[in-house]
Amino acid sequence: MRLILMGPPGAGKGTQAKKICKNLRIPHISTGDLFMKNIEKATPLGLQVQSMIHEGLLVPDHLVVAMVKERLQEADAKEGFLLDGFPRTLHQGEVLMALLEELAKPLDQVFFIDVPLENILTRMVGRRVCRKCGASYHERFHPPKIQGQCDLCGHALVERKDDGEASVKRRLQVYEEETKPLVGFFTEKGLIKVIDGEGSIDTVTEEILQTLEQKV
């Protein structure tokens, strides 16, 4: 299966991506991970990305697409993949469709996890992450057993830099302006399946997997 997972910040895309990929045995491909791996390996693309990130610049589409193209041609993506965090704009969507046509790897489905924006702020403000192991918590919805301390390793929990209220509002504005139009783009191609993101984690996963079972 060749899939894309979309949704606003805080919709739970990362959590769902891990569960879906484990179930389907396909790689979870996120642009953030691609950036980190290329930077760590000091690849030519990674060195360019690192320079731009250090200067506070946005990574241009052609570099992102080049990384995605390389990743999609690796052996583990032969039978399928799940893209998370890409595409983010209409232009990236158009380039991706052309790339997949070039690689003869057409998309099977695009899932849009729909969560009302007024609920996103509540979800994201209050999120905490373990500084040591990366485990995620929420002060209201998924609190640790001991306030401020990770259940798994006992280290301190911190707020992510981009989870402050002002930062979240900026991210939601960018999402509405740049990423949300992709829903219409993929709808016109008959690829979108809207998933109610207000359900439990397991409920959302089950709906996604049931949709895919019907396509087999």
Image (cartoon, rainbow, N blue to C red):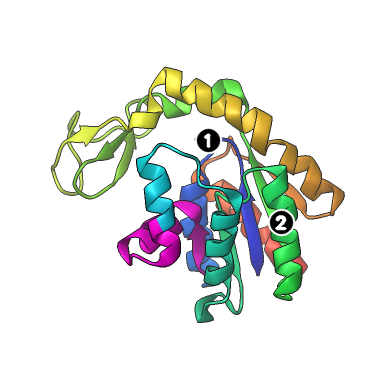
Mark 2: secondary structure:
helix
**73 up-or-down from 58: above or below:** below
Q: Quadrant of the C terminus?
A: bottom right
- Report the side of 58 relative to 144 (left or right): right
Spot occupied by residue 191 in the image (x, y as percentages of width and height) = 78, 55
> Is residue 115 inside the magenta stretch?
no
Closer to us: 95 or 180: 95
Query: Which comes sooner in the sequence, label 1 or label 2?
Result: 1
- Report the side of 191 relative to 55 (left or right): right
Which residue lies under the disc numbered 1?
9
Q: Quadrant of residue 98?
A: bottom right
Which residue lies under the disc numbered 2?
95
Magenta part of the chain: 27-47
Res. 216 visible in picture: no
Mark 1: secondary structure:
loop
> Do the numbered discs 1 and 2 sit on residues whose CB atoms are within 8 Å?
no
Spot occupied by residue 166 in the image (x, y as percentages of width and height) = 44, 18
Instruction: Name the mark nearer the viewer: 1 or 2.
Output: 2
* Kind of residue indicated by mark 2: Val
Which class describes the residues within 10 Å of circle 2: few (<14), some (14-19), or many (20+)? Answer: some
